[in-house]
């Protein structure tokens, strides 16, 4: 079972800080542009997209706060709770906004700025999410992986916004965006629940986690890939908590 070195841990920590900084900076700009364009066009979808960017900033800020400390692991549970609440807030807003739109809210005007912003976010966000997810998994940081999922959710919302604005512009299908947004809201609830529970990653064991498991903190440690053949654990599923080599914890049940 792989154990990362202290030097590698420092590199990964710096990488996560950089990615979080980029995410915060981009989402601040995205929020300002989307809310402004949405207000001008009377688009609840665009305004909702801008508010999602605000939620993404809060999620990234929670991870930035965690990794600003000397011992990020001690702050991880609080960061996860902040991320989870961000997911729930996003789901609540998108659901309410979508239901209002389906009930006959005012139709939005065409927005060239909105279409361009959605396309740009659709191109940028997947790369940011993947980079942060990989770093978080290697480091064994549940909060970094949870925040990467928040970023990926922003990607889905970008696709929904682009499709909704495009269909509304081309065919006048005002119902397309809110229906798709309700699906995104359901995904946000699931991701928020997973973040609250800490079921966010399946990462290689680290020295800190091995020590933590020896101290009976297996519930807080980030999961490690299962060594049981045909266990059915996928790369995205949380699997058996890592244990010290030779402990036999990889195969047995955990109390």
Image (tube, rainbow, N blue to C red):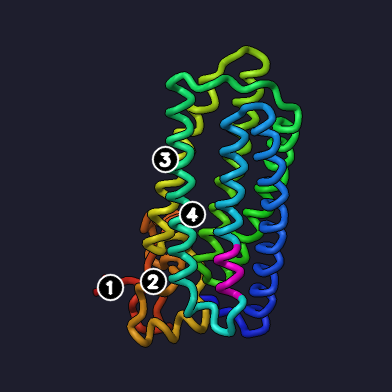
Residue found 56% across the figure and 58% down from its top: 58
Label 2 element class: loop
Residue lying at the far top of the rendered structure: 171
Label 4 element class: helix
Q: Where does label 1 land, which residue? A: 254
Judge whether 35 appears above or below 210 on screen: above
Residue 241: mark: 2
Residue 186: mark: 3
Q: Where does label 4 land, which residue? A: 86
Judge whether 72 appears above or below 233 on screen: below
Q: Rounded to the nearest whole Å, what is the CA distance between mark 2 and mark 3?
A: 28 Å
Label 1 element class: loop
Q: Alpha-carbon neighbours of circle 1 within 10 Å: few (<14), some, or many (≥20)?
A: few
Which of the two discs, 4 and 1, labels the residue nearer the N terminus?
Answer: 4
| Labels 1 and 2 touching (C-beta < 8 A) | yes
Label 3 element class: helix
Residue 127: mark: none
Mark toward the viewer: 3 or 1: 3
Which contiguous range is marked in magenta? Answer: 61-67
Front residue of this view, candidates 137 and 175:
175
């Amino acid at each position: 079972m792989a154990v990362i070195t202290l030097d590698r841990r420092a590199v990964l920590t710096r990488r996560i800080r950089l990615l979080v900084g980029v995410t915060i900076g981009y989402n601040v700009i995205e929020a300002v542009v989307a809310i402004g364009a949405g207000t001008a066009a009377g688009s609840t979808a665009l305004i909702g997209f801008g508010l999602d960017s605000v939620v993404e900033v809060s999620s990234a800020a929670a991870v930035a706060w965690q990794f600003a400390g000397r011992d990020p692991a001690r702050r991880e549970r609080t960061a996860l709770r902040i991320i989870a609440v961000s997911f729930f807030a996003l789901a609540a807003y998108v659901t309410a906004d979508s239901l209002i739109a389906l009930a006959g809210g005012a139709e939005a005007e065409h927005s060239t700025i909105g279409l361009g912003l959605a396309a740009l976010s659709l191109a940028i966000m997947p790369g940011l999410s993947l980079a942060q997810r990989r770093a978080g998994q290697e480091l064994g940081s549940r909060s970094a992986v949870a925040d990467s999922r928040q970023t990926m959710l922003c990607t889905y919302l970008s696709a929904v916004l682009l499709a909704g604005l495009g269909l509304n512009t081309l065919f006048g299908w005002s119902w397309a965006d809110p229906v798709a947004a309700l699906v995104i809201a359901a995904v946000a609830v699931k991701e928020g629940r997973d973040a609250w529970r800490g079921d966010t990653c399946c990462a290689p064991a680290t020295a800190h986690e091995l020590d933590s498991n020896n101290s009976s903190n297996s519930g807080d440690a980030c999961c490690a890939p299962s060594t049981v053949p045909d266990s059915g654990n996928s790369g995205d599923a949380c699997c058996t908590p890592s244990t010290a080599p030779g402990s036999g914890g990889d195969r047995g049940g955990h109390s």
